[in-house]
Amino acid sequence: MAQKPTIPKGTRDFSQAETARRTHIFDTCRAVFNLYGYAAIETPAMENLSTLMGKYGEEGDKLLFKIMNSGEKAADPPERGLRYDLTVPFARYVVQHQSEIVFPFKRHQIQPVWRADRPQKGRYREFIQCDVDVIGSTSLACEVELIQIVAEVFRRLGVGVVLKLNNRKILAGIAEVIGHPDRLTDITVAIDKLDKIGIEAVREELAGKGIGTEKLEPVLALEGSFADKLDAIEKMFSASETGFAGVGEMREVLSMVGELSLDLDIELDLSLARGLNYYTGTIFEVKARDWAIGSICGGGRYDDLTGIFGMSGVSGVGISFGADRIYDVMEGLGLFPQAATGGVRVMFANFGGECMLQAMRLVSELRSSGIAAELYPDPAKMKRQMEYANRRGVLFVAIVGEDELAAGTVTVKNMVTGEQQTITSDEIRNTSFN
Amino acid sequence: MAQKPTIPKGTRDFSQAETARRTHIFDTCRAVFNLYGYAAIETPAMENLSTLMGKYGEEGDKLLFKIMNSGEKAADPPERGLRYDLTVPFARYVVQHQSEIVFPFKRHQIQPVWRADRPQKGRYREFIQCDVDVIGSTSLACEVELIQIVAEVFRRLGVGVVLKLNNRKILAGIAEVIGHPDRLTDITVAIDKLDKIGIEAVREELAGKGIGTEKLEPVLALEGSFADKLDAIEKMFSASETGFAGVGEMREVLSMVGELSLDLDIELDLSLARGLNYYTGTIFEVKARDWAIGSICGGGRYDDLTGIFGMSGVSGVGISFGADRIYDVMEGLGLFPQAATGGVRVMFANFGGECMLQAMRLVSELRSSGIAAELYPDPAKMKRQMEYANRRGVLFVAIVGEDELAAGTVTVKNMVTGEQQTITSDEIRNTSFN
């Protein structure tokens, strides 16, 4: 036999069980997003390279998958690449379709992206991003709505989470107050690693760049409630208008959220920086409470996403759900519902002839009642049919043999308990097979 | 302002309304496929070129989108390409995962494919295929199940259709009977065009290849019911075992379908050939009854799909739903449900301050009842908010101004009828907004 075929490094096949579980996550996000008025758009997998290049830094440019030209243009430089994220295509979409769009524009997008990264555990060359954004409003009610979406998605998924909040203006205020207003990026890059490398390494890194941390460390070490921390930091900001504004925004978001009696743990995390440079206001990050893994969701407010395509001054805010990590958390904690297996509840065994025809009719009736059911296609040996039912994880096997056919009955075997009972064909129509 | 960005030729952006309608089609297919036990798998967008090359003929090889290597391998010939259809990746998947798969293996797959075809009306470089197959069984019960799926999908979508059936063995029998058993491909290619070019052009084409059509034409001209046609053609097949077997298969499929009282028009179409060479038994094609467009769904039985990857003798049968054409039919006939717009039912106007907080609370309650609702994010001028609601196609605008806040009421405006009424906050919780 020929060698078994394979798939490219860093890509994945998803089995039926895996696809059903992933779909459960995406369907949950989708349903919540739609409920909140963020309907989906879709953009093509390929974008013009001119749309993608220069948007992700030098490193990002190298990680773009480029498509070879075909036909006459084969020798020319490539013109198209696979999308690297959903943010740049979203910005491109908004600018391209600005005349048809109603602003504020709320949308979600759940589509794959591709990165020519070195594959490693948890890092793939193709993965699905799940983004929800509103663009064209500076109202902090948008932040509140996204926080509600976070709470509702994870409530529906059954994942306990903590939402960490911060604000880029507060970080800018801190940079001002510690005397390095122009070094915000260095400071946020270092602070962003606090969780992973600890305060001493952060101190060292900043010292190496000539930034003292005496004034910074007390801020990072602040304890207490959200409000206590805000009070403490606000005192520092008498000299920083930006920082003061950041605290004000946080207070307003917090006050509105407080009115909604959300079932969500929210913390102020002054060390939360998030790498992406385009954030300018509130930043979010979600961690699973009972499973150690990086952030499973994050985002923030940006003031000029569409500026790269010539449409400036449009503020927006968005978050992205990390489906692969959410999957790992749910798998690890056993949170996937039984129904998300992609299997059928009832399999009818196949005894051929008239028995098969009767089974076909009954299978159709179960399906009409919304019960996923099937008929084993061949009148194979019983052992083989039962093995199939077992491996497929079917919950019930229904049998219509000669005896049952004559008596107008069906024998139903519960594959979990082994229990077996004979009921009439009419009764089967009213059985829920749970 | 910079030039507006664009997308590559032959690709498409989908707006929220379009995405909602497309999703309605895919969700309907998905729900029916799952009900019948054909759960989804997913395969990567990129496959190794060795998997794809040589599978679609010389012309197909040229239409593959190839991905440039990155890093050190940049100068080497490309190793990966975008998938061209879902059939070859499915065969690859079955062979690669054969030890984990339970046969007969039923699966569906709804994913995009890419073809470097010259773009033209109705032909795109990226489009979604929607395939459902069962592999590992020769039972004609599989054909019947797929016919049920066709009936159920189009019943749910509200599209009136005709299912045309034929069998490759009948075509082979005809080739034998007219004295050209070795010219099956020439004959099927010619009769496949009968619909488009007419009998005279078919006669000419075959004559040019030395094939007389005296014996063929009466077959193509057969009139009458499905059973009548089968009777007539069976008489011809005393000299063709293959043709005789084909008629037998058709009779069996038809008899099983007859037991199920399906609400579906089924015709025997002896001129139905379907281009793809890998079909060996039953072939299907679905046309919309009330809208002129090519076939909107089709497929057939194949005996050796996985042979290309070294796993031979595995028979299967599958069909593919043409989502873009189904979309055009539904759009043309106005069949999309009102709900498939991607919009929200209720928008609360924003009056800021305490009014906004009350609106936020009420919006949350509507969402808890499953009603898609939103709050306009900014306390903008009423005119602007109403314009937004209008352009967005919102059905109801709810108003909580100072008066309503004080009285504990909400004013609700029906945006279709213009009707306006004031109800209490409690009543709004029990309003369905239809």
Image (tube, coloured by chain):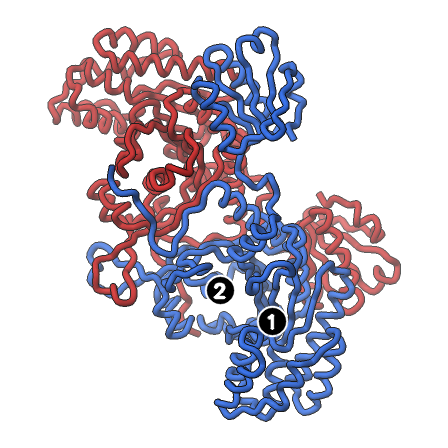
Chain colours: A red, B blue
Q: Is residue B196 positioned above or below A318 on the image?
A: below
Mark 1 vs mark 2, foreground winner is 1
Quarter of the image where the C terminus of chain B is located: top right
Most distant residue in the right direction: A407
Please report, as a chain letter, where disc 2 is located.
Answer: B
Is residue A210 placed above or below A323 in the rendered structure?
above
Residue ID at (66%, 24%): B431
Q: Position of residue A418 (x, y in %)?
A: 72, 50
Q: Is residue B283 found left or right of B14 in the rendered image?
A: right
Secondary structure of residue under mark 2: helix
Binning the other alpha carbons within 10 Å of mark 1 as few (below 14), some (14 to 19) or many (20 upward) gives many
- The Cα atoms of the two marked residues, 1 and 2, are separated by 16 Å
- As drawn, the label of residue B283 is 1
Question: Quick one: quadrant of the N terminus of chain B?
Answer: top left
Q: Residue A230: percent from the left, percent from the top?
A: 34, 11
Q: Which residue, given by chain and number where applicable, does mark 2 sit on?
A: B87
Decide if residue A157 is in sight here.
Answer: no
Q: Is residue A309 left or right of residue A122?
A: left
Spot occupied by residue A90 in the image (x, y as percentages of width and height): 36, 39
Q: Amino acid at mark 2?
A: Thr
Q: Nearer the viewer, residue A10 or B408?
A: B408
Q: What residue appears at the point 54 percent right and 14 percent down from the top-left corner?
A: B358
Residue B236 lies, with reference to residue A422, above or below; the image says below
Element marked by disc 1: strand
Quadrant of res A9:
bottom left
Q: Residue at x 77, y 56 (%)?
A: A362
Q: Nearer the viewer, residue B403 or B68?
A: B403
Residue, x 63% and y 23% (percent of image)? B419
Compared to residue B113, the image places residue A260 above or below, namely above
Q: Nearer the viewer, residue A209 or A146?
A: A146
Q: Dividing the picture into quarters, in which one does residue A293 lie?
A: top left
